[in-house]
Image (cartoon, rainbow, N blue to C red):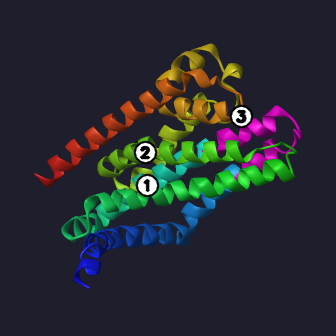
Amino acid sequence: MTEAVVPLAPRARAARRLRPVLMEIGYEFLRLARTRAYSLSVIGFPLMFYLLFGTGHRHGPIAQYLIASYSCLALGSACLFGVGLSISFERAQGWLELKWASPMPRLAYLLAKMLSSAAFALIVMAVLIWLGITVGGVTVSLDQAARLAVIMLLGSIPFTALGLLIGLLVPANAGAGLINLIYLPLSFASGFFIPLRMLPHWVQRVAPALPTYHLAQLALAVFGFAPRSGALLHWLVLAGFSLLMFGAAWITFARREA
């Protein structure tokens, strides 16, 4: 009996450690879903834009292009508002200090926000693919959908890092305006709404310096609108941006604690 019980002990300890993390993720997703200003805007705007601009080009490349670009649009807004704005409000209300003082692992707090935001982006991506197939007349294979989903999950990391920095720096009453002021120009300049080749030349020169551009290139490459050969460079840039933002957020948080 003893030999049968001993191997289960590490599993039980791992389950106990994982349980608060999973609970935090579930509660955070439920909180965002119940926040109508968040859930309706994050899900509604990309779908509305696709119905307006994507379904008018049945069986054309634009309908497929917008599946990728609007998925990126949803991911960025979900992370920046779901992480940045919520942390800003929780910091102003003292909830962030209470979370830090609790025995919950700090990584679980940030992981819950990142995965919950990424889940909303995946929901938007799935509905966009469904609209593209049923209304836009495009073909999306299971392999393309799976690759796009992986890009959405991994792509949530740099925008979570940016949202964390914004949440630690920006007052709650100015968070929404500042996020829009930052994210909308990044979205336009990265080709989320209009293909990059149709934008002014100076925008095309600036775009490679933006994290949204590299996310868009990875997503567009799934459908053949960008070369796959540059995928490694795009991931390296996003990884470097993530480290930079996390480092700045850590310094900001350490100064606040001190």
Per the image, the residue denoted by label 3 is 223
Residue at mark 1 to residue at mark 3: CA–CA distance? 26 Å
- Answer left or right for 27 relative to 72: left
Q: Depth check: 95 or 181 in front?
A: 95
Residue at mark 1 to residue at mark 2: CA–CA distance? 7 Å
- Answer left or right for 23 relative to 8: right
Residue drawn at (58%, 21%) of the image: 229
Element on which disc 2 rests = helix
Per the image, the residue denoted by label 1 is 114
Q: Amino acid at mark 1?
A: Met
- Answer left or right for 44 relative to 160: right
Earlier sequence position, callout 1 versus callout 3: 1
Earlier sequence position, callout 3 versus callout 2: 2
- Answer left or right for 2 relative to 25: left
Which picture quadrant has residue 257?
bottom left
Magenta stretch: give its range.
47-71
